Amino acid sequence: MSITTSPLSPARLVIASRESALALWQAEHIRDRLSALYPDTEVSILGMTTQGDQILDVSLSKIGGKGLFVKELETALMQGSADIAVHSLKDVPMNLPPGFVLAAIGEREDPHDAFVSNLYENLNSLPAGSVVGTSSLRRESQLRCRFPQLEVRPLRGNVQTRLRKLDEGQYAAIILAAAGLKRLGLGARIRNIISSADSLPAVGQGALGIECLASRTELIDLLQPLHHAHTAACVLAERAMSRVLAGSCQIPLGGFAQVQNGELAMRGFVASPDGKELVRAELTGEITDPEALGKRIAEALLSQGAGKILAALNA
């Protein structure tokens, strides 16, 4: 008996992914979801090393930002060697290149930052002068604002590399995304989940984005069962805020939206890298128009002086 393949179920799908353990976990997660949905489709992963993975001795903010993690994957999509790319949404630039689209946004894992230490329970227990590692200006600015007595140093590399540097004693504590640790089965390393009131997450943190060429409408339809509407609404609001503020690795900002009582509740901040200047905004809006809420948050931040902070950073 011959098996016919539905037009919605291609014979083969190739997923482009970075080759870090976390990126491969994410790609394998999407592969397994697609294989369960479309058992007649052979789904494979094309592992790639990006420029962001290769340059580890300089902070991202100085070498072009997180877009360095996605460019090679987009080239694979454009050249046809891959059909879709799976990203941590916090690594995806706010403006995609022409011809590309986020076809689906997966359900969010824990969006918070995690405190990891072998010696201390939480940030409040760190003695003055303790060295804290983070790769993020967003985390650094909030740390410096709340804990000026701590020493914040850059921390690059994949999750395992960062944990090794902690275990070698280079840092008293490090701050990582809780989602990445949990996805890699390393949740036991988390000593404390930092509340969003104390460390507002990065735009898109904890969510996965699936990118493809905008012209591949059949792929976009194929991916819709993986799309999580509430997560997408939150992330679209956050990304709209960041887009208005020209958010990137070079700008310490955070944005976090949640669905509450049928509405979107969102908070945002912009800060100077040293944490001495920090402005916050908090608003609610319609879940059906998340980008309008993100823009309102950006405007509220600008009205409180975010523009001055941004101008100083870009000077």
Image (cartoon, rainbow, N blue to C red):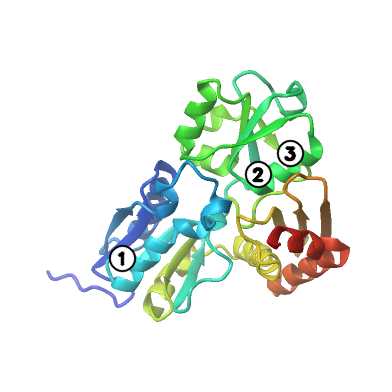
Q: Residue furthest right?
A: 304
In this view, 5 is above or below 151? below
Percent from the top left, x then y, of residue 185? 47, 34
Q: Earlier in the sequence, mark 2 or mark 3?
A: 2
Asked whether, in this view, residue 197 is left or right of residue 229, the answer is right
Identify which residue is drawn at 45% across, 52% down: 52
Q: Earlier in the sequence, mark 3 or mark 1?
A: 1
Q: Nearer the viewer, mark 2 or mark 3?
A: 3
How many angstroms separate mark 1 from mark 2 (CA)?
31 Å
In this view, 216 is above or below 230? below
Q: Nearer the viewer, mark 3 or mark 1?
A: 3
How many angstroms separate mark 2 from mark 3 (CA)?
14 Å
Residue 82 marker = 1
For the residues bearing labels 2 and 3, Cβ distance under 8 angstroms = no
Percent from the top left, x then y, of residue 227? 51, 65
Q: Nearer the viewer, residue 205 or 249?
A: 249
Asked whether, in this view, residue 162 is left or right of residue 136, the answer is left
Residue 143 marker = 3
Residue type, mark 2 in image: His
Q: Nearer the viewer, residue 141 or 7?
A: 141
Percent from the top left, x then y, of residue 46? 29, 56
Residue 112 marker = 2
Residue type, mark 3 in image: Leu
Identify which residue is drawn at 72% across, 48% down: 273
Q: Residue furthest left?
A: 1
